[in-house]
Image (tube, rainbow, N blue to C red):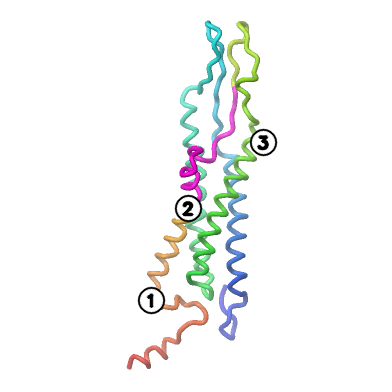
Amino acid sequence: MMPSAAGRPRRSLWFAVLSVIGGLAVCGAALGALWAWIAPPIHTITALTRGGERIDAFLGRESDNLFVAAAMMIGLLTMLAVISAVLVWQWQPHRGPVLVTALWLGQVAAGAAASGVGAALAHWRYGTADHQGVALSPENRVHYFTEAPPVFVGHHPLQIAVTLLLPAALAALVYAFMTVATPRDDLGAWPGEDPLAEAAAVY
């Protein structure tokens, strides 16, 4: 958003902060819905052995989808991180540490929204597999399941934190690169420094 004719931005800094965080949260929810549609499900079986023991197993290489689905979530959030950093940079009057903090927090909110919406829709689509409750008999020894894909690589808090914080850190890094590439100390933000006044002060 460009400044008004008087040089002041049309929207306040707090409006920009809330817009960035809220907009990224909404985008994260949309990415979660997209992920639930394209992420590969997990095909498993529960079988009864000849000795009467119940076993659970993956079909073929379906266990690979545990990683693939989680990696797809990180990939979508990474794409959002790069695009959002470039778009937030275009809000020139508010460039600076406050807006990059909003970008970082918004990306975390996007990750949380994407994970929550994606997990909810995936479980709504595929249901919850009840391996222990399925009835098996010598005549019907095998039961097949299609399970919802996971949004995280694992359930450890550190693994969940990586999914949420890695794209946020990438967004901040992209914003930092654009900051470094800007010749002006004020980044062109408002209220900016007058280049002519600076030159006069030097000479």
The residue wearing badge 1 is 183
How far, Cα to Cα, is label 3 from label 1?
Answer: 51 Å
Q: Is residue 31 depicted above or below 145 in this figure?
A: below
Quadrant housing the N terminus: bottom right
Residue drawn at (65%, 20%) of the image: 133
Q: Is residue 146 depicted above or below 71 in this figure?
A: above
Instruction: Residue 46 in the image: state x and y as whole percent.
Output: 57, 18
Instruction: Identify which amino acid the numbered label 1 is placed on.
Output: Pro
Q: Tell me, yes or no, whether the two marked residues, 2 and 1, touch with CB atoms within 8 Å.
A: no
Left or right of 36, for residue 72? left
Mark 3 Cα-neighbour bin, 10 Å: few <14, some 14–19, many ≥20: few
User: Which of the numbered marks, if any, corresponds to residue 167?
Assistant: 2
How far, Cα to Cα, is label 3 from label 2?
Answer: 26 Å
Residues shaded magenta = 145-166
Q: Considering only order in the chain, which callout, 2 or 3, is on the residue closer to the N terminus?
A: 3
User: Which of the numbered marks, if any, corresponds to residue 124?
Assistant: 3
